[in-house]
Amino acid sequence: MPGIGRKSAQRLAIFILKSKDGYADKLVDAIVSIKANTTFCKKCHNISEHEECNICSDPKRDASKICVVEDIVDVMAIEGSREYRGLYHVLGGVISPLGGVSAGDLKITSLMERISFENISEVLLALNLSTEGEATMIYLSQMLHDKNVEVTPHSPRRTTGLSPGVCGPDDYWQGYRCPVEDMKIIEQYYWC
Ligand SMILES: [Zn+2]
């Protein structure tokens, strides 16, 4: 399983072996239930129990912003900050020629459809700062160039040039406006 090495697996196995009667059965039932009752949001591709996830269907969220992330765990991490109030779009990976992942394998078409048909004014590109992640952000920036949205790409140079609280709402860096609140979240998530 991702994130669980041999030692961790051994500890979990010993914990289950030592558990009270019925614990293992409840654990199995819970895993089966999660698999049976969980799907993916038809809009943002986040994990969900319904057609639309709790974030997309929450009227209190700022529906003018979309934060584009690589994976569901990125949504969980940013949500953990409890500061970002916009929507998300989970790409399901990044473009990786060596890994056999092309743009057509990602949820890019549905992202463009959302931008065309929803009232989106700002797109935050918050992909991981790997070579593939940066290449994917450049690709998306080019695709969004002629759309009527403000694109805020995440850049390693940007994070070394600015730190949380340094920039003001009217500050510019590398030609991009610094969205102070969102900037803090993304920096906390990746570097703090
Ligand atoms: Zn959703």
Image: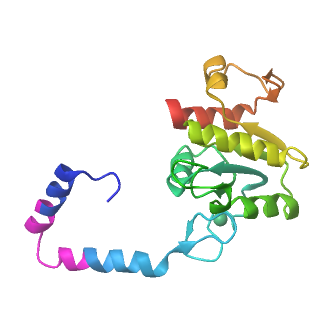
Magenta segment boundaries in residue numbering:
14-26
Count of numbered badges drawn on the protein: 0
Q: Who's the residue at 74% across and 64% down the image?
A: 110
Query: In front: 141, or 167?
Result: 141
Question: Quick check: is 23 in the magenta stretch?
Answer: yes
Where residue 61 appears, as percent x and y from the top left, is 72, 56
Would you identify the image quadrant in which residue 48 lies?
bottom right
In the rendered view, tell whether residue 72 sits above or below residue 170. Answer: below
Left or right: residue 92 versus residue 119 is: left
- For the stretch drawn in magenta, the main secondary structure is helix
Left or right: residue 117 versus residue 27 is: right
Q: Who's the residue at 75% across and 62% down the image?
A: 109
Query: In front: 111, or 46?
Result: 111
Left or right: residue 188 versus residue 67 is: left
In the rendered view, tell whether residue 58 sits above or below residue 81. Answer: below
Q: Who's the residue at 68% across and 38% down the image?
A: 182
- Which coloring applies here? rainbow
Where residue 119 appears, as percent x and y from the top left, is 86, 58
Where residue 80 appears, as percent x and y from the top left, is 52, 47
Q: Quadrant of the N terminus?
A: bottom left
Q: Who's the residue at 82% across and 47% down the image?
A: 144
Residue 133 visible to an observer of this rendering: yes
Where residue 41 appears, as percent x and y from the top left, is 62, 70
Tell which quarter ligand 1 is in.
bottom right
Residue 59 visible to an observer of this rendering: no
In the rendered view, tell whether residue 78 sits above or below residue 16. Answer: above
